[in-house]
Image (cartoon, rainbow, N blue to C red):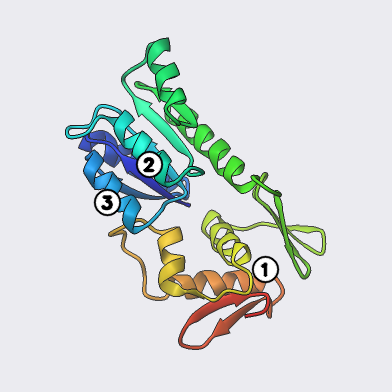
Amino acid sequence: MPILLVEDDHDLARGLQRALQNDGFAVNHVATGNEALAALDTEVPEIVVLDLGLPDIDGLTVLKRLRAAHPELPVLLLTARATLGDKVIGLDSGADDYLPKPFDMEELLARLRVLERRRGTASSSDISIDSITLNTANQEVRVDDAKVELSRREYMLLKALMENAGRVQTREALETKLYAWGEEVASNAIEVHIHNLRKKLAPEFIKTVRGVGYVVGRA
């Protein structure tokens, strides 16, 4: 799942990137409000983690502009402003969650998983195609009602394909959902994940569109 991290403390940002990537998130980092807004104009992530004390634009201003352009995009505020009044202002300005610094990494990961589930369950938690059912609430995949164990990246890749059933997904588009900017990605990484998924699911479930990408369901 792609996360945009907006944090001007580079040491903290590097630590967060490592921890989040170890938990399977693809984390893209910017250090200013203007960079965040420009990034959102180019590519919309699935969650934004936003510091309020930015060097150019106050984080609340970024939040309000973000919310106007992307009403449904989950935003978690990560900030040293820790008073009750600060929390109320942040939540009233459009944030979905508010975590004051210092914080425990396990709590941040838990809160991100809640936002991830909430985003996936806006309409229905089950996505079913043929014999495959993917539940976004508990991140569980079943084939003919038998649970299948997937790595986090395998799960995110399958989720991206099933959410776009019938629409061909290019390798580049899939890479943006699984990997952060600048992250070293093997040239055949997506192909390897697809190969592993095909062994765990029905082999013909994910179809290759030669020279374009991959699709599930009818293209």
Mark 1 in CB contact with mark 2 (< 8 angstroms): no
Q: Position of residue 32 (x, y in %)?
A: 22, 40
* Residue at the extreme bottom of the image, as rendered: 210
Between 200 and 168, the one nearer to me in the picture: 168
Q: Position of residue 35 (x, y in %)?
A: 23, 46
Mark 2 in CB contact with mark 3 (< 8 angstroms): no
Give the Cα distance between marks 1 and 2: 39 Å
Upstream in the sequence, badge 2 or badge 3? 3
Crowd around label 2: few <14 · some 14–19 · many ≥20 (10 Å): many
In the displayed structure image, the side of residue 95 where residue 79 appears, left or right = left
Upstream in the sequence, badge 1 or badge 2? 2
Q: Which mark is residue 66?
A: 2
Query: Disc 3 marks which amino acid?
Result: Ala
The answer to which image quadrant residue 80 occupies is top left
Q: Which mark is residue 146?
A: none
Between 131 and 35, the one nearer to me in the picture: 35
Secondary structure under badge 3? helix
The answer to which image quadrant residue 133 occupies is bottom right
Q: Which mark is residue 200?
A: 1
* Residue at the extreme left of the image, as rendered: 55
> Residue, x 56% and y 83% (percent of image)?
208
Give the Cα distance between marks 2 and 3: 11 Å
> Residue, x 54% and y 38% (percent of image)?
115
- Which is more foreground, mark 1 or mark 2? 2
Q: Position of residue 67 (x, y in %)?
A: 42, 39
- Residue pointed to by mark 3: 38
Query: Disc 1 marks which amino acid?
Result: Lys
Is residue 216 depicted above or below 34 in this figure?
A: below
Between 75 and 3, the one nearer to me in the picture: 75
Secondary structure under badge 2? helix
Crowd around label 3: few <14 · some 14–19 · many ≥20 (10 Å): few
- Which is more foreground, mark 3 or mark 1? 3
